[in-house]
Amino acid sequence: MSNTTTYQQFVNSIVKPGDEIICQLTPQKAHMLHMAVGVSGEAGELLDAIKKNCVYQKQIDLNNVMEEAGDILFYLTGLLGELDMTLEECIEANMNKLSKRYPQGTYSNSAAIARADKLPDTLEVKQIPNIEDDFEDVKIKRVCNLDDETCESCQ
């Protein structure tokens, strides 16, 4: 058996089944997933626009950069709204974090590596028990909105 086949079997044995993911989605989770995937997709498009300039020496398409940045902002705002957060709160939190990381107010490699805004790696963190383990035998019937049918896995 090849390493590829062995790895494929390994992945298949531990991957969470798609039907289980679908059955656990709520409208809120579906919306958050849509927004987060949108941010990621648009970030990829922005990256491609920058890559063309940096790697292929093409003139930067500022209209495209603006469009992709706007799309990222759209999806990010949608995600934050679902979580009752605002862009202003994110800006403030980010400024607080970076002010701790760069207390001199300027970038330095040493400050970036030290990451003063993060907890030390030596901090002991207590494990929180998985609450789902207590409910393994509980079956919850849920109707999924897949082509207006009931998901067989949810029954």
Image: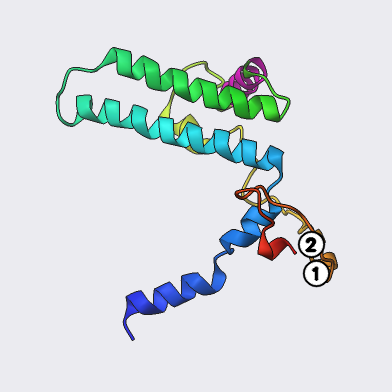
Q: Is residue 45 above or below residue 26?
A: above
Mark 2 highlights which residue?
132
Q: Is residue 136 left or right of residue 82?
A: right
Q: Quick check: marks 1 and 2 in contact, CB under 8 Å?
A: yes
Q: Is residue 71 left or right of residue 77?
A: left
Mark 1 packing: few (<14 Cα in 10 Å), some, or many (20+)? Answer: few
- Check disc 1 and report its element: helix, strand or loop: loop
Screen quadrant of the N terminus: bottom left
Q: Is residue 98 above or below residue 4?
A: above
Screen quadrant of the C terminus: bottom right
Residue 94: image x %, image y %?
59, 23
The tag on residue 136 is: 1
Residue 30: image x %, image y %?
63, 41
Front residue (pair 130, 64):
64
Mark 2 packing: few (<14 Cα in 10 Å), some, or many (20+)? Answer: few
Residue shown at 65%/52% (left/top)? Answer: 122
Residue 67: image x %, image y %?
38, 17
Magenta segment: 88-100
Type of the residue with mark 1: Glu
The residue furthest front is: 148
Q: Quadrant of residue 18?
A: bottom right
Q: Is residue 65 left or right of residue 125?
A: left
Type of the residue with mark 2: Glu
Q: Is residue 81 visible?
A: yes
Front residue (pair 6, 88):
6
